[in-house]
Amino acid sequence: MNPPTIAVIEDETPIRRFLRASLTAEGYRVLEAEDVAGGLRTITQQRPDLILLDLGLPDRDGLEIIHAVREWSTVPIIILSARGEEKSKITSLNAGADDYLTKPFGVGELLARVRVALRHAARLATSSEPEETSFGFGDVRVDLAARTVLRGSEEVKLTKLEFDLLATLVRNAGKVLTHRFLLEKVWGPQAIDEPHYVRVFMANLRKKLEQNASRPKYLLTEQGVGYRLKSE
């Protein structure tokens, strides 16, 4: 069997070297990136078995990697961050991270958590069906992996945030999602006091995807709470 592949996304060269040495000594194959753009490119092209992710990356916040990857994959993500406050941990875990280690950390603890995450992923792979990445409602088909939306045979052009909002709804089809949940998932925790973001972008999605935007059949408002994508 091929050794598990681990993507290390970390901007500090000494830490990357330390992680590479520690992981290769245990037989893992290591991929490296130093920013969000390189990390996303590495993940989509190489499909690692596990991701070690720093949040404080030079181009953008590492949380963006979690949000992007969770649109199409359940690959384990372990955060390695100097942000030790509880709020940062909760935000990361709510975004889809599997574990969180605060720097500085011991190599023994890191390796133990890597083994646990890989074992858990292996159990899920053998006990469940492959993850569904294509969803449909009405005449709309959403492909989360390809980040495309079709309405009938025509492709619908969505902005990044419109797609992120739609992806969050389809991943939770049938569930009522609060304004706060959607704001944190799509715009980040800094936007939780801006509920008009969701209203504006939901209106845009309805115009593009519903037969009648003023009387939506699928992208539904739950008055005073949030929104729900009607599941078929």
Image (cartoon, rainbow, N blue to C red):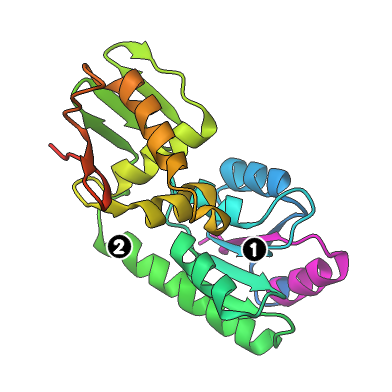
Count the numbered circles shown.
Answer: 2
Q: Is residue 65 above or below residue 4?
A: above
Mark 1, Cα crowd under 10 Å, few <14 / some 14-19 / many 20+, is many
- Is there a contact, CB below 8 Å, between mark 2 and mark 1? no
Q: Is residue 117 above or below residue 154?
A: below
Q: Amino acid at mark 1?
A: Leu
Q: Which mark is residue 126?
A: 2
Foreground disc of the pair 2, 1: 1
Residue 196: name its quadrant. Answer: top left
x then y, percent, for residue 175: 21, 52
Residue 205 visible to the viewer: yes
Point out the stretch of residues depicted in magenta. 1-23
x then y, percent, for residue 188: 54, 54
Task: Indicate left or right for 37 with 187 as reference.
Answer: right
x then y, percent, for residue 35: 75, 51
Task: Indicate left or right for 55 with 74 as reference.
Answer: right
| Residue at (30% x, 41% y) in the render | 170
Q: Secondary structure at mark 2?
A: helix
> Magenta span has 7?
yes
| Residue at (38% x, 37% y) in the render | 199
Which residue is situated farthest in the right direction here? 14
Residue 132 visible to the viewer: no
| Residue at (52% x, 48% y) in the render | 187
Task: Indicate left or right for 76 with 38 as reference.
Answer: left
Mark 2, Cα crowd under 10 Å, few <14 / some 14-19 / many 20+, is few
Q: Amino acid at mark 2?
A: Thr
Provide the residue designation for mark 1.
53
Residue 231: name its quadrant. Answer: top left
Quick one: quadrant of the C terminus?
A: top left
176, 166: nearer the viewer: 176
